Image: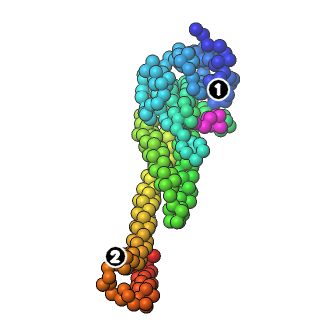
Amino acid sequence: MNQTPAAFNATVANCVAYGADGRKLRDLTPDEISDFLAHADGFVWVGLVEPDTALLEKMQKEFGLHELAVEDARSAHQRPKLEAYGNSLFIVVQTAELAGGNIAFGETHLFIGTRYLLSVRHGASQPYASVRRSCEQNPGHLALGPSYAMYAVLDYIVDNYLPIVQEYKQELVELEQAVFSELSNRDVTRRLYDMQCELLTLKLAAAPLQDILNQLVRLHPEIIRDEVRPYLRDVHDHVTRGSDAINAMREMLNAAMSVNLSLISVRQNEVVKRLAGWAALLAIPTLLASWYGMNFHDMPEFREPWAYPVVIGVTVAVCVALFIVLKRAKWL
């Protein structure tokens, strides 16, 4: 069953043809892609958002994509990777953005050939419209072909990693203040744990990109222009710095978690010490009262009129003395 144009428009973010000089020629419909590639110079840049099976099958037909790569793009939930299929490459990159104070993850799948770039976005991801506009303002760069457009997308994805780490770093400063305050509680520990888990996922998204970019810098000369390789090395440097920042942030979170748990233990010990101190104070009158409450006739000074005040005085004196000792020992 053919999909309607309205349905195509819902998931096709852009479908643009560029000339050999890098200038935008015109917007294309999905049905015009193969005709343009067959009769004109330049390349096609297509962006899809959460495409369905029918649209991916249409792209497979227009670009001649490998069925295994299309299957991966359809199912999503892929690990970051680079795979070569004949004269085309299939790249999976994980995207990340902050949403409500937490990191939301998504995927971008890139199909790149000698004359086309197809991006497929799944999940949380910023639109690539700004990337396209920036490239179109420099036609000389787009004249390098789809490999430069691929670089621009990868650079945009990688550059979104570092602000997340910086945002978490600022939040950690606030959490550290809460850790060392008297108000530290389970919510602080929970947030530190959540941040550790999310940064671990971010690390698993960023680290494989180093190998992917190494391959793009060194291999696949039939697709990657030599003029683009310095730009890809720059992205590799950004990924390395981002991975280092993520590792440093995780170390800081581990330290904060350890300190937080240690301080919780210290506070619990302080509470136990105070309880033990007050229990010792209460034990003195309890002990004396239990002695004189046994109703024996031969208790010391039992029949003397001053016995009761003396016992009370001794009890108070011993309690005060013990209180002073415990106070100096910081048990109260």
Amino acid under label 2? Answer: Met
Note whether 117 is above or below 179 in the view shown. above
In the image, which residues are magenta?
Answer: 125-132
Amino acid under label 1? Answer: Asn
Residue 177 lies within the magenta run: no
Quadrant of image for the C terminus: bottom left
Q: In this view, does 146 lie to the left or right of 24?
A: left
Tell me residue 255's x, y (percent): 43, 59
Q: Is residue 39 visible?
A: no
Q: Give the mark, 2 or 1, whose residue is nearer the N terminus.
A: 1
Q: Quadrant of residue 156?
A: top right
> How busy is the neighbourhood of tag 2: few (under 14 within 10 Å), some, or many (20 plus)?
few
Looking at the image, which residue is at 64% across and 27% down?
13
> How busy is the neighbourhood of tag 1: few (under 14 within 10 Å), some, or many (20 plus)?
many
Element assignment for label 2: loop
Element assignment for label 1: strand
Residue 130 lies within the magenta run: yes
How far apart are the alpha carbons under marks 2 and 1?
A: 95 Å
Note whether 270 is above or below 326 in the view shown. above
Mark 1 lies on residue: 14
Quadrant of image for the N terminus: top right
